[in-house]
Amino acid sequence: MAEYDYDLFTIGGGSGGVRASRVAAAHGARVAIAEEHRIGGTCVIRGCVPKKMLVYGAHFAEDLEDCQKFGWEIEGKSFDWIKLRDNVLADVDRLEDAYTDTLESHDVAIFKERAEITGDHEITLASGKTVTAKYILIATGARPRLPECAGVEHGITSNEAFHLDELPKKVIIAGGGYIANEFAGIFNEFGSKVCIVNRGDQLLRGYDEALRDRLLQISVMKGIDFEFNTVFEYIKPCEDGGYFVKLKNNDEERVDLVMFAIGRVPNTEKLGLDTVGVALGDNGEIKVDEFSKTSVNYIYAVGDVTDRVQLTPVAIREGQAFADSVFGPNDPYAVDHSCIASAVFSHPPIAAVGMTEGEAKNKLGSVRVYQSDFRPMKNVLAQRNERSLFKMVCEGDNDRIVGIHMIAPDAPEMMQAAAIAVKAGLTKADFDATTAIHPTMAEELVLMK
Ligand SMILES: Cc1cc2nc3c(=O)[nH]c(=O)nc-3n(C[C@H](O)[C@H](O)[C@H](O)COP(=O)(O)OP(=O)(O)OC[C@H]3O[C@@H](n4cnc5c(N)ncnc54)[C@H](O)[C@@H]3O)c2cc1C
Ligand SMILES: NC(=O)c1ccc[n+]([C@@H]2O[C@H](COP(=O)([O-])OP(=O)(O)OC[C@H]3O[C@@H](n4cnc5c(N)ncnc54)[C@H](O)[C@@H]3O)[C@@H](O)[C@H]2O)c1
């Protein structure tokens, strides 16, 4: 008889949990996973994937406008939100099945219910069933943070945004980060009047200032309104189905939809963590070492619940490294969290890797910055007055590239390749020695002055 029911019990079937469970099983471990909502987690079910599909859908609005300058006449164009919504949700169903199949084909036992730790090596499921495991992995992710204001129950979060029955004529979004800017772009392209309300005076903190300014300028040009340094005071339903929203220092105004995108809170409550003594940080996140081990020897945690970098590829890497290290044949290894490339799928998108100009100046003292500020060829012919900006930040002494920042159509696609060079420690001279591919936007990377 084995000492435990399973070698590994994973709580949470999202990006990190699914990867860790599948890889541990492939290494020969007996694995079970519990998921209280849907297999796939935030990214697949109500995050990156359906969001990107909406971004694609939204972008057609500009393409259909621009195509006329390229000689195309489209008569009777119209947009059907319900059709897009249902097609996206159907693809999410397909992906959930694919993720479930992956687990099943690796003989991972799936419990479609909530789980919590109830004792040493012991997990209890919502149905009341209790199982034991040699190792426990917590991969419970995070949930949208809600503001403290009267009438908060009348607002939605990104969780609900994918299921709307109709598009709002007017939407007000609290936040100034990834989700606020991405959904502002989506709603705006679909014809909604959008206002972003940010508590601070900066959008997308952490990104290079020049890019943030450019996104703000383009967003305003596209018709998105911004209110900075303020928060919601109250939200009240009005008789026609909309809401009255009052911001601190502003008059009440009527909107059709209120959305909160003010950050995400790690899911660590009611998990029994105090029962076994798993230590938490100041924001309720699980504290882990570089191998994702918690303060309890046999309990590990990966992904958003640890609040290191809340991105899918990071959760996946952490899950993979945990499974390889604990169940694989080779030495344990840690995930390298430095120099992680990221993107904001706004209209246009932003992408970045490494240090901003400001960070590099603070950290390195001497820096050299190369810049390319240009109107993409497609925008020129379309007479779309929207300029792109590329920035390369280099260490002053040796020209090693320490950061690249872009706001441009398809910037995330270009950045994935450029990030390899930055991670590898290449210099400006290496880029200069590379012949351009002409005509492209990406050639600006090797032609920067
Ligand atoms: C709108 C939106 C857009 C995003 N877009 C991007 C993007 O473009 N690119 C990117 O890299 N990242 C994006 N992210 C972030 C990305 O989704 C997360 O970083 C990633 O999903 C984290 O993976 P995870 O495994 O840590 O958690 P999750 O994927 O959230 O999975 C955790 C799972 O645990 C389950 N769970 C929680 N508690 C329990 C319990 N007690 N018992 C059983 N199950 C439980 C939850 O139901 C959930 O399914 C986006 C996030 C949002 C909200
Ligand atoms: N493209 C991507 O990779 C992507 C997309 C979406 C989400 N994500 C991940 O999900 C996380 C959460 O996204 P997010 O946009 O919710 O958070 P965020 O941390 O990116 O931004 C939060 C914003 O809300 C503002 N804010 C805080 N409290 C407020 C209040 N009461 N009223 C008004 N504004 C307030 C902050 O000033 C900040 O600008 C991100 O940090 C990111 O890691 C990634």
Image (tube, grey):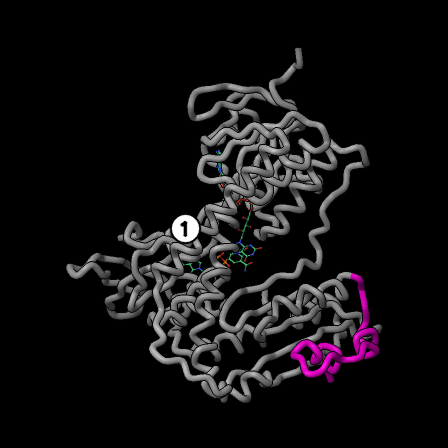
Residue 198 visible at all: yes
x, y percentage for residue 103?
59, 35
The secondary element bearing badge 1 is classed as helix
Q: Residue beneath label 1, please? A: 159
Left or right of 403 in this view: 109: left
- Disc 1 marks a residue whose amino acid type is Asn
Q: Main secondary structure of the magenta part?
A: loop
Q: Quadrant of residue 205?
A: bottom right
Q: Residue at x 42, y 74 (%)?
A: 61
Q: Residue at x 42, y 23 (%)?
A: 127
Specify few, some or many for label 1: CA neighbours under 10 Å numbering under 14, 14-19, or 20 or more. Answer: few
Q: Residue 412 location, x and y as percent?
A: 61, 66
Q: Nearer the viewer, residue 268 or 32?
A: 32
Query: In this rendering, does residue 120 appear at all?
Result: no
- Quarter of the image where the N terminus is located: top right
Residue 145 placed where, x, y %?
Answer: 43, 50
Q: Which residues are magenta?
A: 424-449
| Image position of 259 (left or right of 427) | left
Which residue is located at x 68 percent, y 83 percent?
A: 439
Which residue appears at 45% of the width and 85% of the height?
A: 68
Q: Is residue 335 magenta?
A: no
Q: Is mark 1 within 8 Å of ligand 1?
A: yes
- Residue sitting farthest toward the top: 1
Give 219 or 417, whichever is nearer the viewer: 417
